[in-house]
Image: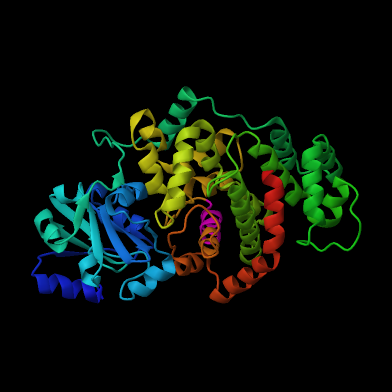
Amino acid sequence: MALSDKLANFLTLKGIHYQQIEIEPVANLDAAVLASGQSQRNFMQPTLLIDINGVVMAVHRFDSTLDLDAVHQFTGRRLQPLTARQTARLFGDCDPGFVPPVGGAWDLSVLVDEDVVKAEQVLFSAGTNHCLIGMNGRAFRLALAGAREAHLVIRGQSNGSRGALTLDEVADKLQKLYRLPPMPALALRILKLTTNSEATARELAELIEFDPSMTAQIMRYARSALFNYPGQINSVQEAVTRVLGFDRVAHIAMGIASVRAFDVPRSGMLGMDNFWRHSLYCAFLCQNLAARLGRDKGLAYLCGLLHNFGLLLVGHLFPLEFQELNALREINPEASMHSLEQEVFGHGDRQDILAVGHGAIGGILHRLWQLPEPVIKAAGMHQTPGYHGEHEDYVLMVQLANAMLKKQGIGDEFNPDDIQALTEALGLEPATLDLVQQEIQQVASDLDVLASSLAS
């Protein structure tokens, strides 16, 4: 099936001429846009909304984000985004995440952003993960006949006159324009200790005990039901030697100390509360995956724990824009973070720097902090589907962990991933994922408690 059945029938019935553009199967619409090699400016996408009066499809350009306040002012309705489950029920003939922006094929009411009707050429999903539709603007306007037109989106002012900066140029520009936070002294001392093969549990404990707050957090971690240690734990050294182990204590302590470099609010989907929850769950999953793959469990844990630090750096450097990004994330759960970042930062002096996304920004920071190479790659590439290259297994473990967590509503991205492809790329059996999923369910409440304590 190249096109969804209803879309094919609708276009044939209306006599609308179109082209089918075959691509390799991809995980989501972002990947399809990249795979096409076409300008994202020509791509159209739908946002599906619902209230007690029914479902509405809002059609807008791929490089824009719907403004729900504008929709409310135009319609007088308090519409909210459809959930993934509601979307799957309504668009049963489409692959998840690949709904075409042609609401008439499903007898839906349609709103269209005024910028869409000006397009001369249009591309959009055919309803499957391996095909796109191309048509001229006139044909697309015919497909949208009867739609109500208004200004519905928040627009960034893109500048297509120059190429994107390389990561080296981004790193250089970041350092010149902004005061990047140095790695906190305690985190740096812990990092140096982990590179010393002769370092002892006593030396690590003494470092941590200089910080009463961190000491309390490490002790709480060791005493949690995550480990079910039957005896008393009276010191950090006992936590290291009896329960947690050197690497785990060093990595969680380094994470705690490093986060103190950033001033980011606690609330919201991108706030510090959810950051810690996401990071701890991801670290736990990566560690368990690494154990089954014969990879370094401590290093995998650190990759999962620190992979999203770019988001903290963005929030630290640009608090007002971060607040806007946080709000957009709340009302656009099925949009990719990259598209939302483009909306908020796709204009002005910061466009070139932040166009690479928070993942690459995090990788740049980790390199400046001289963290291990797999940690740098996992942070820098966790937003890159189909990654192949250095330290590939660690990147893919973070991507797979994030994909599994999305099913539980954990993380900053809720658009679907290709879990099967990630599993196969790592050489894992599907049954293994079921076991890992069961393991994290058993400790979920304890991870939630720990995340709350670390964020406070």
Q: Nearer the viewer, residue 429 or 255?
A: 255
Q: Furthest-front residue in view?
A: 76
Residue 3 visible in the picture: no
* Number of numbered discs on residues: 0
Across and down, in percent, residue 317 comes to 51, 31
Classify 256 as above or below 294.
above
Left or right: residue 148 versus residue 276 is: left
Across and down, in percent, residue 436 comes to 63, 69
Residue 52 visible in the picture: yes
Which residue is painted at 82% across and 50% down in the image? 240
Classify 179 as above or below 101.
above
Which residue is painted at 34% across and 30% down in the image? 348
For the N terminus, the image quarter is bottom left
- Magenta stretch holds residue 362: no
Q: Nearer the viewer, residue 79 or 285?
A: 79
Which residue is painted at 91% across and 56% down in the image? 232
Q: Which segment is the magenta one?
A: 391-401
Q: How is the image coloured?
A: rainbow
- Magenta stretch holds residue 398: yes
Across and down, in percent, residue 155 comes to 30, 41
Magenta span dominant secondary structure: helix
Across and down, in percent, residue 259 comes to 64, 39
Which residue is painted at 53% across and 68% down in the image? 427
